[in-house]
């Protein structure tokens, strides 16, 4: 590709005349916005160690009462985007949230979609549209766009979870806002029981659920059991991975971000194809070495990392004698809807 004219090549008076009329010449910036072959990626490979961030999160519990925080979160920010942007990738926000015994994070709803992956502790719950979702380690709980949600904690030790939101995208689109609400009346609990068995859904009097988000809690015990049975049934050459889906439609469980859980068998190494989406990895159990063309991380339990798209990624279980379990988030659902999703071989 030949070089194009630079901004400095233009007379200063001409540049001033353009600026005065809010005009910009395209050619000095054309290669930056349309680089050849591969996008210019701002997302940097970044890793956050849970044992390192945990004391700072607990300290936030002492420094800032919940009333002054509403959501007591340390954001896992990618330096490639600038820490102040509070984003892990171009579309993904990650935060570690702390709720102390007896605390309550008040009801609200907002346009960004959120999920919580429970990292530590017992006794907390999220109420979503009146459905009480207990929060146990490894559970995935959805609070999709527009649904009322609040968090409470009846246990006696701190509870920590990883929030994954599409906030950077929704904010960029100038569609991000919140509404405050009153404490919800719990109308049901354990509604996920409705979808405990694959292949069947509730159909009372031949009617299927018309809800956009029929399942709000994906209990880790069930997801783990699904992975274990897949591992037994599948050939060893096939990766043991499940996607979190809407059980009524089989589509991704949310519109913008996609979520899956991967089981690495003892001693297993997997090579993931180069895909156009950035990816987040979080270790639910065990540990893994994660390598891309530029980064090499070793994730222990509860650690989190983010890797940019367009690179192959190698995952190796660090546990010689047992399986490791990894939670994965990406924006593949969005990219597929927009027609920009690619897998490069
Ligand atoms: Fe929220």
Image: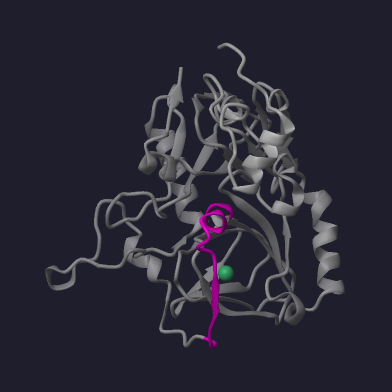
**Quarter of the view holding residue 70:** bottom right
Q: Residue at x 45, y 40 (%)?
A: 332
Q: Is residue 111 left or right of residue 251?
A: right
Left or right: where does residue 138 sit relative to residue 304? left
x 61%, y 28%: residue: 32
Instruction: Specify the quadrant that holds the N terminus.
Output: top right
Q: Measured along the vertical axis of the image, is residue 37 above or below residue 144?
A: above
Q: Is 271 contained in the magenta span? A: no
211 over 281 or under it: above or below: below
Res. 70 visible in picture:
yes
**Residue 248, position in %: x, y?**
27, 57
Residue 255: where, in percent of width, then height? 40, 53
Rendered location of residue 105, percent (x, y): 64, 77
Q: Which sits in the foreground, 145 or 192?
A: 145
Relative to residue 173, is residue 157 drawn left or right? Answer: right
Q: Residue furthest left?
A: 206
Q: Is residue 181 above or below residue 290?
A: below
Q: Residue at the spot x=44%, y=26% of the render?
A: 343
Q: Quadrant of ligand 1?
A: bottom right
The residue shown at (46%, 42%) is 227
**Residue 199 position within the rendered picture, expressed as x and y whole percent measured from the top left:** 25, 51
Q: How many marks?
A: 0
Span highlighted in magenta in the image: 168-183
């Amino acid at each position: 590709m030949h070089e194009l004219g630079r901004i400095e090549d233009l007379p200063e008076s001409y540049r001033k005349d353009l600026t005065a009329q809010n005009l910009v010449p395209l050619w000095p910036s054309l290669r930056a916005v349309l680089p050849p072959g591969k996008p210019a990626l701002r997302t940097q490979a970044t890793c956050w160690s849970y044992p390192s961030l945990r004391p700072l999160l607990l300290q936030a519990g002492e420094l800032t009462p919940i009333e002054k925080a509403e959501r007591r979160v340390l954001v896992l920010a990618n330096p490639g985007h600038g820490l102040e942007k509070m984003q892990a990738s171009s579309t993904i926000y990650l935060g570690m949230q702390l709720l102390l015994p007896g605390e309550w994070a008040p009801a609200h709803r907002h346009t960004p979609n959120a999920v919580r992956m429970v990292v530590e502790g017992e006794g907390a719950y999220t109420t979503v549209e009146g459905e009480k979702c207990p929060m146990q380690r490894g559970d995935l709980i959805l609070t999709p766009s527009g649904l009322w949600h609040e968090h409470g904690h009846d246990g006696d030790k701190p509870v920590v979870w990883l929030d994954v939101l599409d906030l950077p995208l929704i904010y960029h689109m100038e569609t991000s806002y919140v509404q405050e609400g009153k404490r919800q009346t719990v109308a049901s609990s354990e509604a996920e029981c409705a979808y405990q068995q694959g292949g069947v859904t509730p159909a009372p009097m031949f009617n299927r659920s018309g809800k956009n988000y029929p399942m709000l809690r994906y209990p880790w015990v069930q997801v783990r059991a699904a992975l274990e049975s897949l591992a037994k049934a599948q050939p060893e050459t096939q990766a043991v991975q499940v996607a979190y889906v809407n059980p009524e439609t089989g589509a991704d469980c949310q519109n913008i971000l996609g979520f899956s859980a991967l089981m690495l068998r003892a001693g297993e190494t997997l090579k993931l194809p180069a895909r156009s989406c950035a990816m987040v990895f979080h270790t639910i159990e065990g540990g893994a070495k994660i390598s891309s063309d530029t980064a090499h991380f070793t994730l222990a339990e509860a650690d989190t990392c983010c890797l940019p798209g367009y690179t192959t990624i190698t995952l190796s279980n660090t546990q010689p004698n047992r399986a490791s379990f990894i939670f994965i988030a990406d924006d593949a659902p969005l990219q597929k809807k927009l027609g920009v999703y690619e897998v490069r071989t």
